[in-house]
Image (spheres, rainbow, N blue to C red):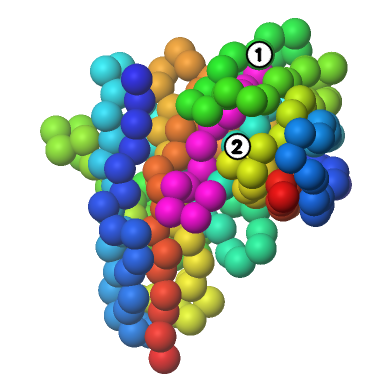
Amino acid sequence: NAGVTQTPKFQVLKTGQSMTLQCAQDMNHNSMYWYRQDPGMGLRLIYYSASEGTTDKGEVPNGYNVSRLNKREFSLRLESAAPSQTSVYFCASSALDRVGEAFFGQGTRLTVV
Amino acid sequence: AQSVTQLDSQVPVFEEAPVELRCNYSSSVSVYLFWYVQYPNQGLQLLLKYLSGSTLVKGINGFEAEFNKSQTSFHLRKPSVHISDTAEYFCAVRSGGSEKLVFGKGTKLTVNP
């Protein structure tokens, strides 16, 4: 059982380049999340999606866009990468009947130079 | 808006000693509270959760936490730690009626021999 799968695992971008981080879950979960993790800052919520077709901003949405393509997939796009977006990005999902029990992917380590 | 404060960024302890990791939350409505653990270079996994009912909740690996509504706290405890408990621990809160899951900045627990 794969759980939450993120691709890629590592990425180096130049300032101004764009890219999309992919996330897919095979647990039939309704809610999906994107977080970034920075030293001393914990996990900060970028965007979340409570159900297919809906997305909402979290704490730090600026510079990012998301798409909930279907129930399984939730992608995060950086339109014009900046060094401040260097971080580890985690995707997570949770089920309606398992309140707050989020399952996490292994993370994407992104470096913007 | 909901928020979580983890009072200690780092906690060093000796093996077999007891440990308490502190967490305070703020929310204007009913809350669900969680503790997650992150081992090096991995995603997060759920340790335990408080949804309702008994204020003392038990989780995996011998950890437990107590919900204290009057002090808005949800401290994590273990009576005797092992080297393998070395990890970063995150407290998280979700308000009733919201899918938004917000994390604290984390506490790094280091267990020394």
- Residue B24 at x, y = what percent? 26, 41
Q: Which x, y percent locates residue A45?
A: 54, 31
User: Label 1 amino acid?
Assistant: Thr
A87 or B53, which is in the foreground? A87
Give coordinates of residue B74: x percent, y percent.
Answer: 29, 44
Q: Which residue is mark 1?
A: A55
- Relative to B95, A16 lies left or right: right
Q: Is residue A41 magenta?
A: yes
Query: Quadrant location of residue A57?
Result: top right
Q: Tell which subunit mark 2 falls on.
A: A
- Whether residue A40 is visible, yes or no, is yes
Write the start and end of the magenta stretch as one range. Answer: A38-49
Q: Is residue B67 visible?
A: no
Residue B78 versus residue A58: which sits nearer the camera? A58
The numbered mark 1 sits on a residue in which chain?
A: A
Left or right, A70 with reference to B94 = right
Up/down of B27 relative to B72, above or below:
above
- Residue placed furthest toward the left: B70
The residue carrying pointer 1 sits among few (fewer than 14), some (14 to 19) or many (20 or more) residues within 10 Å by Cα, namely: some
Q: CA distance from mark 2 to mark 1?
A: 14 Å
Q: Main secondary structure of the magenta part?
A: strand
Please report whichever mark, 2 or 1, sits nearer to the chain's N-terminal start: 2
Q: Quadrant of residue B107?
A: bottom left
